Amino acid sequence: MGDNFHILVINPGSTSTKIGYFKGLEMLTEFTIRHSKDEIAQFDTLQDQFDFRLRIILDELQRRNIDLDGLDAVIGRGGLIKPIPAGVYEVTPQIRHDLQHPIGHHASNLGGLLAHHIAHKHKARAFIADPVVVDELQDVARISGLPEVPRQSIFHALNQKVTARSYADLIHKRYEDINLIVAHLGGGISVGAHKQGKIVDVNNALDGEGPFSPERAGTLPAGAWMRLVQSEKYTHKQLRRMLSGRGGLVAHLGTNSVQEVIKRIEAGDEHARLILDAMCYGVGKQIGAMAAVLGGKVEGIILTGGIAHNQYVCDYIRRMCGFIGPIHVDAGENELQALAFNAAAALDGVTTPLPYE
């Protein structure tokens, strides 16, 4: 599929920008540009970082002698636009507007904007695919205990989708014919119920639902949280950071590194063990909940994301959830490859970009 297409992939993160340059599905070059805290701190908003990130991306591509005039497509990780079905989307004026006026703050908001700028200059097509706002929730899963606060689908859609499809290929079945549970374990944690090709339930991994993670607080006792807010000890910005950025392992142990926590455990720190076990316990509970969503018919449980490299975490989840179904570990994030695949499929006509309305 699309062996001769040249595709540039842009995946912005909070303190880095990952770049991949592909010929078809073959990655010719991959690199990560790190952004120091001091560099990021000079900008008031994510949107203010656009020119800064664009310049260093172009400088690095030039330094590596990558000819952008031969590009067929540029694809960026999609951001916090309105909820949409999974798929590939051409970057339209409406998408650019919504990325500039997003529903929340996330570095991926820059992905489609950077892709469009570079593609437009070099007469290529610009895409996003499976952004974090992919919404395939069944109606019953949208309802919370307050009509003013419906549940939202914000999660690691891109990696969840590509990992699920890869597992389906591994067991020689169609993704659309099976039920899976995928747990993305990274700075945020999302656990999704994949029912015959649709993610019908998943926790909001960005700001306040599901297991706590290295940087996010997850679901909190509502009354205690309300009292903390009303105490006026913290500013609105500080409270937001408690939910996302300074929650989870960071709040309990002062680090977002699971490897660092493991070292503390090996040195005899039982408090560190308790906190890491609590995070794993939360993941196991969420997997169990998603098994109930699927009526217990689960062809596989997939652990993915950077933390899935950690044996301690995977073993804990296996002990909790092995009775539900086979557990498969696909560690790391395959986002650059997933984005390139989606762009190649659109260029080759295998996939038709979906309308964004």
Image (cartoon, rainbow, N blue to C red):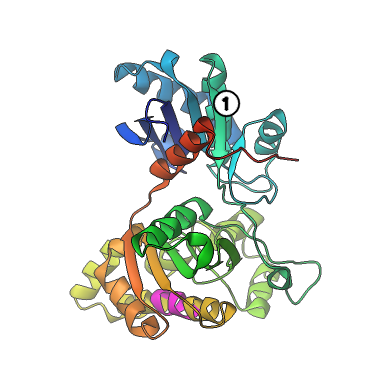
**Would you say 175 lies left or right of 260 here?**
right
Q: Is residue 297 magenta?
A: no
Asked if residue 254 can be seen in this view, the reply is no
Q: Which residue lies furthest to the bottom in this view?
A: 323
How far across and how far down the image is residue 66, in percent? 34, 19
Query: Which SS type dominates the magenta stretch?
Result: helix
Element assignment for label 1: helix
- Which corner quadrant of the image does residue 136 belong to? bottom right
Q: Which contiguous range is marked in magenta?
A: 279-285
**Would you say 337 lies left or right of 207 here?**
left
Asked if residue 28 can be seen in this view, the reply is yes
How far across and how far down the image is residue 79, in percent? 59, 43
Residue matched to label 1: 116
Position of 86 relative to 348 (above/below): below
- Which corner quadrant of the image does residue 319 belong to? bottom left
Q: Nearer the viewer, residue 2 or 66?
A: 2
Position of 262 relative to 54 (above/below): below
Q: Nearer the viewer, residue 21 or 26?
A: 26
* Residue at (49% x, 35% y) in the render: 343
- Which corner quadrant of the image does residue 141 belong to? bottom right
Q: Nearer the viewer, residue 322 or 298?
A: 298
Pick the quarter of the image with the N terminus.
top left
How far across and how far down the image is residue 331, in percent? 32, 59
Q: Does the magenta stretch include residue 284?
A: yes
Pick the quarter of the image with the C terminus.
top right
**Would you say 63 lies left or right of 2 here?**
left
How far across and how far down the image is residue 2, in percent? 42, 31
